[in-house]
Image (tube, grey):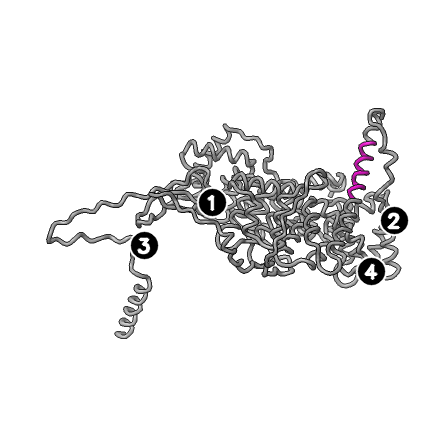
Amino acid sequence: VDWLLSGPPAENELIAQIYEKHHDKSLKSALEAKCGKKFFLALSALLLPPEEFLAMRMEQAMKGWGTDSNVLVRILGGLDHASKPSMCQVRDAYQRKYTRTLKDALRSELSGNFLKASIAWIDALDDPSQHLEVVTNVDVATTADGDLDQLIDDLLTEHESVDKMMASIDAQEIYNCIHGWGTSDTKLIELLCSRSKPHLQKIAEAYYTQRDGQSKTTSLLARLRKETSGWYRTFVTYLVESPEDADVRALDAAMDGLGADAVGLIEFLVGRSNARVRAAKEKWEGKHDAPLVDRIRSELHGSNETLALELLKGERDESGKADERLAVNQAEQLNAAVSRWGGTDDSTFIQILAKNSPAQNRAIRTAYENKYNKSLESLIDRVSNKNLKKCLQALLLPPADYYAMRIRQAFVGLGTSDKVVCRVLGGSDKPDALAIAAAYKRKYGTVLKDGIQKECSGKYKRVAQAWVTLPDALEDPEAPIELPDEIDEEEDKEQPSSSDDEPEPAPAAPPPPAAVPVYQPPPPGTFQVVVPSNAGPGSQLIVRAPTGQQMTVIVPQGVGPGMPFAVPMPAAPVAQAQPVGQPPPDKKKDDDDDEDPMKQLLAMGKKFMATYNKK
């Protein structure tokens, strides 16, 4: 208590973070077990920033049956633009924590003059423009050095005001696209896909302000979901959501229900930057008022839990530099972590690969191949835990390359995994989506836009293509905005559920014959082998030739999962002559040449019935 009372809020937050890293549980949960209700509430106030604590108290006052008006009066009446924290800080903290505005929450709980006074007080303290045009319209060369700092602050404030004005114009334009009979999808896609996710959040806020009191549907996301359908609606949902909201939705979908979806957690923890992991963690904890580390500990066990908690700390090296000497040493440590009997020391893999940068892990892969003449992926393949194996292999790739691989896997096979396409591409910010498209072209030699053209359809195809090709119009106003041509084709029939967890769609109908690529047969004297998803360059595969012979082949460099390569046809076995009059020697059967299993089952049934009849 003395430590929490004597330190500033920032120091208390640091104490809570250090405690969580050392004990793998939150300080809040540790205090709750040893304190009374009111004393714990007081200590919780010392662990949170003041604006977040007041936002939490107002949420608690409006939660459940009835509303504690006294708490709302004390908090709202005690805040203004000069208080610490200010009304604007508390208002923004509430929206950040609970994904709805404070005014929206008050409207759902209050009525009459109390509601009118509360809304008017919040609006009166919001001053977006501040009339800085006169102050900033000066010559920088003639500005005194002491006034430059203030000028920079004024310019940033003015930029924020202009940004809000652009968001307000975009919100009105979106309303024009979806208002009335039908939807102008071309204009809507062009506007949404030429903005970044942070700006789309400002558009959503401006849309709510414009439509408040004038329409039943004041949420931009709710209105867009009402105007769209199928996978088009799903992609737009991920698009309009902030990166943190998309991650929180993915986390909830992965951890709610019976058991945890390890693949969803892999995509979140492995492919996200440290800053995004920390932001999503803060967003999840703000929404649920519970520590994420405690929830993951209750959902995962063993090595999966160890890896998830390590990545959740957000301490992975992102410097981009590789130490070649350290890579050789770490390659030796990883090789020693696998015993000659096949057992693996999972903690060694986690401690090395989960803390390294992608560049350092690539250096380890190169060092391992040079020293042991086999791929690091083949070593990781000996890890027995399937989900841990996927995580470790994903850690060897940069995030953009990993997500490009996930999109490629979604395109391979019968139909397309549209849920993965929406979650990966729609959940990525504009720069990240463009980086995934560049990585896809670099890895597979084809343009991601063309892959979407073949695998997707309708408006869903157009919005996905636009998101990975169009530039950010606010960052580069001179860049041309060219949308894919609109082709009359049947829209997707599958209609994902309106809930957050869309079910897997039915397999998509096969494309028309004109869109099917022409099969290219392998060169004469060879046969074709497709690399499985858990193998890569340097991996050893056991295949069966068309002649029936079993052989071991090595995946060549540059050939990844789902890609084919040609293998020379093995020589035919030499027939051995037998003396006349002697029967040929008994032929040993391979496992694949055994008797038909159904015949074996019938024989076992007859034997059992004969024994039963005797008894």
Using residue 148 as the reference point, say whether residue 11 is left or right of it: left
Instruction: Give the mark nearest the N terminus, 3 or 2.
Output: 2
Query: Residue 253's quadrant in the figure?
Result: bottom right
- SS at badge 4: loop
Instruction: Give the mark nearest the N terminus, 4 or 1.
Output: 4
Which of the image's four quarters has the C terminus? bottom left
- SS at badge 3: helix
Instruction: Give amino acid for label 2.
Output: Ala
Residue 493 belongs to magenta span = no
Q: Which residues are magenta?
A: 151-164
In the picture of the structure, the residue carrying the numbered disc 4 is: 110
Q: Specify few, some or many for label 4: CA neighbours under 10 Å numbering under 14, 14-19, or 20 or more.
A: some
- SS at badge 2: helix
In the picture of the structure, the residue carrying the numbered disc 3 is: 592
Q: Nearer the viewer, mark 4 or mark 2?
A: 2
- What percent of the width, then of the height, locates residue 175? 76, 54
Instruction: Give amino acid for label 3.
Output: Asp
In the picture of the structure, the residue carrying the numbered disc 1 is: 561
Q: CA distance from mark 4 to mark 2?
A: 19 Å
